[in-house]
Image (cartoon, grey):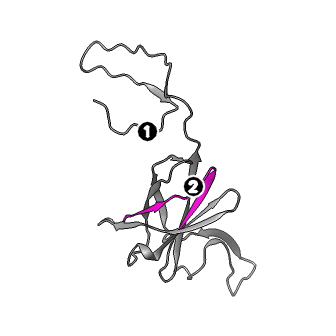
Amino acid sequence: TIPPGIVGRINVAVAPTRLPSNSGSFSFTYFDDTRPEVIRVTPGVVFSDVTTSVSVRLRKFPEVTGSAAIVCTFVDMNGTETQTLATAYRRNRQGLTTISVPCPPGETMTFLTIRAEVQPPREVTTSIVYFNPPSGPAVVVPTDEDLTCDGDSDRTTIIISNMRKVEDKST
């Protein structure tokens, strides 16, 4: 049984009472397997010139009574802190939780801490990287592939830089 509140490396020494010179020692690490985990953050790119909401998928996040009980804190590389509440909270049958939170304007990598105000409070931290918006038009990056198609089933890869996002899948 793991004692409550103990996480980290533990050293154990064992010695018999009759022959204390026959002692031994070993170490092991306790880890908190109830700690929430970030599975995915979407979108993967946040541009610095627009307000974007990110969706964070979590495992082992506690059940809460609504989005007001989920506090989201953004801390940028300069130490500037912005706190907001999650705007959506959804839990599926497999116990995975998805929350949505609006990102404040930013220009650097920012750490996002999501805290469930339950007893005991549970939190998890992930990072969000802000990018400057593309300047100028989108550009097709040259590849070694032949871009000609001679049938319905041919496929090719086209790499485009300096582009924010493709909205719909092209057929």
* Badge 1 element: loop
Taking the spot 42% from the left edge, 66% from the top edge, the residue there is 87
Question: Compared to 123, does 40 lie above or below?
Answer: above
Give the x, y percent position of residue 34: 48, 71
Q: Which residue is mark 2?
A: 105
- Check if residue 100 falls in the magenta segment: yes
Instruction: Kindly identify the amino acid type of the residue bearing the numbered disc 2.
Output: Pro
Q: Residue at x 57, y 49 (%)?
A: 129
Q: Which residues are magenta?
A: 96-114
User: What secondary structure is the magenta-colored segment mainly?
Assistant: strand
104 or 97: nearer the eye?
104
From the top left corner, tell me how far across and down residue 80 is, in percent.
67, 63
Q: Label 1: how many residues lie within 10 Å, few (<14), some (14-19) or many (20+)?
A: few
Residue marked by disc 1: 165
Q: CA distance from mark 1 to mark 2?
A: 19 Å
Residue placed most toward the observer, 151 or 171? 171
Where does residue 101 sit, x and y in percent of width and height?
Answer: 46, 62
Residue 61: image quadrant is bottom left
Judge whether residue 151 is colored magenta: no
Residue at position x 49%, y 28% in the image: 138
